[in-house]
Amino acid sequence: MKQPVVRPGILDLKPYVAGESAIAGHNRVIKLSSNEGALGASPQAVAALRAAAADVHRYPDGGAVALREAIGRRHGLDPARLLCGAGSDELISLLVRAYAGPGDEVLFTEHAFLMYRIYAQGAGVTPVAAPENGLVADVDALLAHVTERTRILFLANPNNPTGTYLPESEVRRLREGLREDVLLVLDAAYAEYVEKNDYEPGIGLVDGQPNTVMLRTFSKIHGLGGARLGWAYGPDHVVDVLNRLRSPFNVSAPALAAGEAAITDHAFTDLAREHNDYWLAWTTQRLRALGLDLTDSVGNFVLVTFQTEPGRTVNDADSFLRGKGIIARAMGAYGLPDSLRITIGTGEEMQACADALAEFVAG
Ligand SMILES: *Cc1c(COP(=O)(O)O)cnc(C)c1O
């Protein structure tokens, strides 16, 4: 029997594998595999989600007006230049589909967030990865990999899973070295966690340039990964293009309500940031003291690289942690076959994880 024929390239895609949330035989696990907010979501956002259930028979506001206005007030941005999506994943997909096609290239760093590659391949676009320097994005290498076919450069800043970031001056140098018709997409999913005075999530560059877009998400510090909500800030013409391409009701009404409550709950985001500051430093220090190799992460996770001798490998560490009910994330798919990414969870979770790794290291 004949089958429908799928477009070239689709069957080469490896489906995204999400962080696991269960271990057979454990009824309680510590899930540190998906960079979800350690403290859950703002109680006000959860209340707004519940309240939204009463009107769930109504279509959402397709223009996300109230949420864009709330984001605009929070960050001092013009709501007309904001666009909301079902997670920033959807915005990445829309940007690829709008600005690149078969024969074009999309550029990113060696260990970049996987969705850039997956959406590029899905649209028949050639993904190109530029080498990093010590697990940090390398502006010169990125610029050296630009060709006349490059349409978009995605930079996750800070990057997941390396946790490293580029200072504002380097991002500016990158923009200045790019052709004007190459769209620079600054994916600032972890911006709220960064406490560095040389960091800027991209608002300044978007304001000054007709060819730069910043992406943000409610999935990390706001703890709303399950609601699927993200936003883009960009030039008018890019926002206009994405508005034409997106589904008319791409963000659900409960997600809009939760987002509005979350973005105005400053006390909760402050608490989440302070929690991360403390436990990121604590975890980094504790694991380094065990002799483990960690990058200098500025996100809500650490990247730990293991040795290759039998008994000491990343797989050994992963199995050991699982034996204790702790789920981290192996990073083979990101070109980091010896590394585990561990999300910053609650204090108790980090203590349990560090104790387990201490036991592992002691053999
Ligand atoms: C988690 C993450 C996202 C956000 O994904 P959502 O679709 O908004 O949940 C985007 N970019 C990076 C680098 C991430 O780590």
Image (cartoon, rainbow, N blue to C red):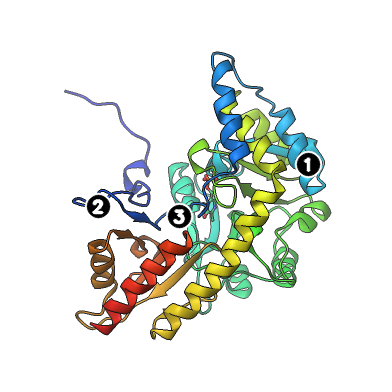
Residue 4: where, in percent of width, then height?
29, 26
Nearest to N terminus: mark 1 or mark 3: 1
Indicate the quadrant where residue 218 lies: top right
In three-dimensional space, the C-alpha distance between marks 1 and 2, rounded to whole angstroms, equals 42 Å
Above or below residue 40? Residue 307 is below
Mark 3 — residue? 114
CB contact under 8 Å: marks 1 and 3: no
Is residue 23 in view from this perspective? yes
Q: Which residue is more in the foreground, 233 or 11? A: 233
The extreme left residue here reads 1
- Residue 14: image x %, image y %? 33, 49
N-terminal label among 1 and 2: 2
Circle nearer the viewer, 1 or 2:
2
Residue 148 in percent (x, y) is at 61, 58
Q: Secondary structure at mark 1?
A: helix
- What kind of element bears circle 3? loop
Q: Which residue is mark 1?
A: 72
Residue 220 placement, left or right of 191: left
State the residue position of label 2. Answer: 23
Mark found first going from the N terminus, 3 or 2:
2
CA gap between label 3 and label 2 equals 24 Å
Describe residue 27's horizontal placement relative to residue 347 as left or right: left
